Amino acid sequence: MSETQPAPVYSIGLTGGIGSGKTLVADIFAALGAAVIDTDQIAHQLSAPHGAAIPLLVAEFGDGFITAEGALDRAKMRALVFAEPAARQRLEAILHPLIRLATEEAAARSSGPYRVFAVPLLVESGTWKSRINRLLVVDCPESLQVERVMRRSGLDAQEVRAIMSAQATRAQRLEVADDVIVNDGDAALLRPQVERLHALYLQRAAGTP
């Protein structure tokens, strides 16, 4: 007798530009009971000391891109990939398959009425559209993105805008969004928006129109 496949779990793709507040929104969903799988966290784990990606990164880019602690030197790698587009492709060829595998494993271990996949470059990736039921975008003005990232990271405005230029535009994200959370003010304004969507997603996950 063949094994029956488990029913697919209702899944939300959560995305937004750098500095939009994706992590804050993901944390609220998690607090409400959703199963949150954050691919940014997974990428950091893979490139942390003793991470699964480190030996492959050393083989491809050399020891000079690894810190004394054994992690990926993010600042040095960021400078390389913006200076050399081919380097970005080499980096992604290493990280993306590992991230996808770890994401699938995390999803299989997760529990909750529905899953939220927090993916920074979800709109840019064609592979995610078939893996989610709805796309949720966290939105804010681009000037606010720059301000937030400068404040938290110490990067200057030009560096932040260079990162943003490698991402989908605000208009491109909003065009494909099923749902939008606006994060252009106080963080306290996020929770009511998340709670409203949480109720919707619970209904959809239960098969209620």
Image (spheres, grey):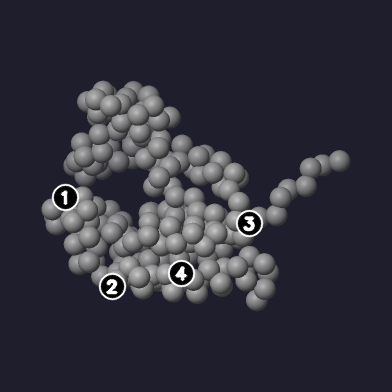
For the residue pair 58 and 175, the one nearer the viewer reads as 58
Label annotation for residue 154:
1
SS of the residue at dot 3?
A: loop
Residue type indicated by callout 3: Val
Circles 4 and 2 in contact, beta carbons < 8 Å: no
**Which kind of residue does numbered mark 2 sit on?**
Gly
Mark 3 packing: few (<14 Cα in 10 Å), some, or many (20+)? some
- From the image, tell me which residue sits under label 3: 9
Q: Point out which mark residue 185 bears.
A: 2
Residue 38 vertical placement versus 48 (above, below): below
User: Mark 1: which secondary structure?
Assistant: loop
- The furthest residue to the right: 1
What residue is shown at x 63% (from left), y 56% (from top)?
A: 9
**Helix, strand or loop for disc 4:** helix
Q: Name the quadrant containing residue 34.
A: bottom right
Res 43 seen here: yes
Q: Residue at x 30, y 26 (%)?
A: 70
Q: Which residue is mark 4?
A: 194
- Taking the image as shown, residue 1 lies to the left or right of residue 28, namely right
